[in-house]
């Protein structure tokens, strides 16, 4: 049983939450403003749909690394995640996806649930790689479908302006795969057309995509004008707070991701990111030329960052949990209600994480 200010699907409840066999079985209490007492906040566990690593481990290293990563992020409030690949040659992706397929939808004690895979590349524009390795290729349907056979790929990031990719978007959408537009030099019209073909969202909005200009609105303009969903990195390095506010107002299903690397939770130094090495310093992760290369962000810090720029805690919780769950069609995660998985985070009044529960298992207590 947990007691405090519970953010349920019906709003704040001051009372008690009961769990059994990994599920929420009862909520007791009355609706109340959490500012009326000093009890802790109990929120839905965080869902991170774009995570490359953590705790010194990189997804492209395989299953053992993913296990390390899930433990690190669970200690920071993430209860479910998508293991996110990097652009890589075909044989390497086959190897990695084969290993991810073997562990997906399983959960080792002490870690977050792996909900599937986010395939970020290789179907991106080579002229907007960002921190991705220079191994981008044009998507071929048979190859993409072969990847889907190896692992439960829930999201594919691609550049819609590349010849043939509009048809790939349609084919993947018809199979229930969420296609996100990213690492792209596409125009506003490319973005709108891709959405009409079934694209579901945008990868790390504002980053590695054609920017908004009032006479050339670009991919960012397509997202702000038309998207129901998009991911954003709220580490306050990748995106200015003003741009975050603009996205919050424009995109109803905006959800936060960490885009974290192996450097998350680790001291300054050099870490692997796919086939490359990156350096953690000054709170960020960069390539040798200074390009931002993922992040060191964890979801508990994302919560504090979003509150610090003026967003209400209940709204922040939706950006970290509910919207991502809805985007993937997960009706029993990302929310606190009877019958949902007991994926929960507990924060004190200073917004320090004090406990994480993954499917009812207490992962961390009195974390700092």
Image (cartoon, rainbow, N blue to C red):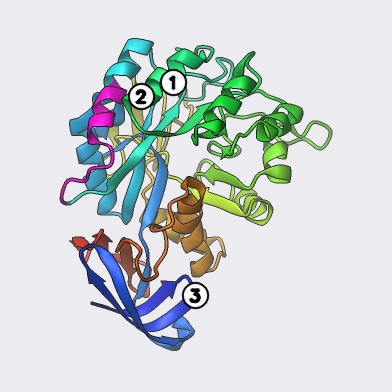
Q: Secondary structure at mark 3?
A: loop
The picture quadrant where one finds residue 147 is top left
Span of residues in magenta:
96-109
Q: Residue at x 47, y 23 (%)?
A: 121
Q: Furthest-right residue in view?
A: 215
Residue pointed to by mark 1: 145
In the image, 148: left or right of 158?
left
Contact flag, marks 1 and 3 (Cβ < 8 Å): no
Q: Position of residue 53 (x, y in %)?
A: 31, 36
Whether residue 355 is visible here, answered yes or no, is no
Q: Secondary structure at mark 2?
A: helix
The picture quadrant where one finds residue 51 is top left
Q: Secondary structure at mark 1?
A: helix
Contact flag, marks 2 and 1 (Cβ < 8 Å): yes
Q: Which mark is residue 10?
A: 3
Question: Distance of mark 3 from mark 2, alpha carbons?
Answer: 39 Å
Q: Residue at x 22, y 48 (%)?
A: 111
Depth check: give the residue in front, 360 or 274.
Answer: 360
Question: Distance of mark 1 from mark 3, alpha carbons?
Answer: 40 Å
């Amino acid at each position: 049983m947990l007691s405090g200010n519970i953010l349920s699907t019906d709003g704040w409840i001051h009372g008690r939450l009961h769990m059994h066999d990994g599920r929420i079985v009862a909520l007791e209490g009355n609706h109340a403003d959490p500012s009326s007492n000093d009890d802790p906040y109990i929120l839905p566990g965080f869902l991170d749909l774009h995570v490359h690593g953590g705790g010194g481990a990189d997804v492209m290293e395989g299953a053992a690394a993913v296990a390390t990563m899930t433990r690190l992020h669970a200690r920071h409030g993430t209860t479910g995640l998508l293991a996110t690949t990097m652009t890589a040659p075909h044989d390497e992706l086959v190897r990695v996806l084969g290993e991810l397929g073997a562990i997906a939808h399983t959960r080792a004690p002490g870690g977050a649930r792996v909900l599937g895979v986010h395939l970020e590349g290789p179907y991106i524009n080579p002229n907007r790689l960002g921190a991705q390795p220079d191994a981008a290729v044009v998507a071929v349907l048979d190859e993409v479908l072969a990847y889907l056979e190896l692992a439960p790929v829930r999201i594919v990031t691609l550049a819609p302006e590349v010849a043939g990719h509009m048809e790939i978007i349609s084919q993947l959408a018809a199979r229930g795969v969420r296609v996100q537009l990213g690492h792209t030099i596409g125009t506003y019209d490319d973005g709108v057309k891709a959405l009409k073909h079934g694209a579901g969202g945008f990868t790390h909005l504002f980053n590695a995509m054609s920017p908004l200009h009032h006479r050339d609105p670009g991919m960012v303009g397509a997202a702000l004008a038309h998207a129901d969903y998009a991911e954003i990195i709220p580490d306050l390095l990748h995106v200015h707070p003003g741009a975050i506010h603009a996205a919050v107002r424009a995109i109803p299903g905006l959800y936060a991701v960490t885009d974290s690397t192996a450097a998350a939770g680790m001291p300054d130094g050099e870490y692997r990111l796919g086939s490359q090495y990156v350096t953690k310093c000054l709170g960020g992760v960069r390539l040798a030329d200074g390009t931002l290369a993922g992040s060191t962000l964890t979801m508990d810090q994302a919560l504090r960052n979003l509150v610090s720029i003026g967003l209400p805690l209940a709204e922040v919780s939706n950006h970290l949990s509910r919207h991502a769950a809805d985007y993937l069609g997960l009706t029993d995660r990302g929310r606190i209600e009877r019958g949902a998985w007991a994926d929960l985070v507990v924060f004190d009044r200073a917004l320090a994480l004090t406990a994480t529960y993954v499917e009812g298992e207490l992962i961390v207590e009195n974390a700092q």
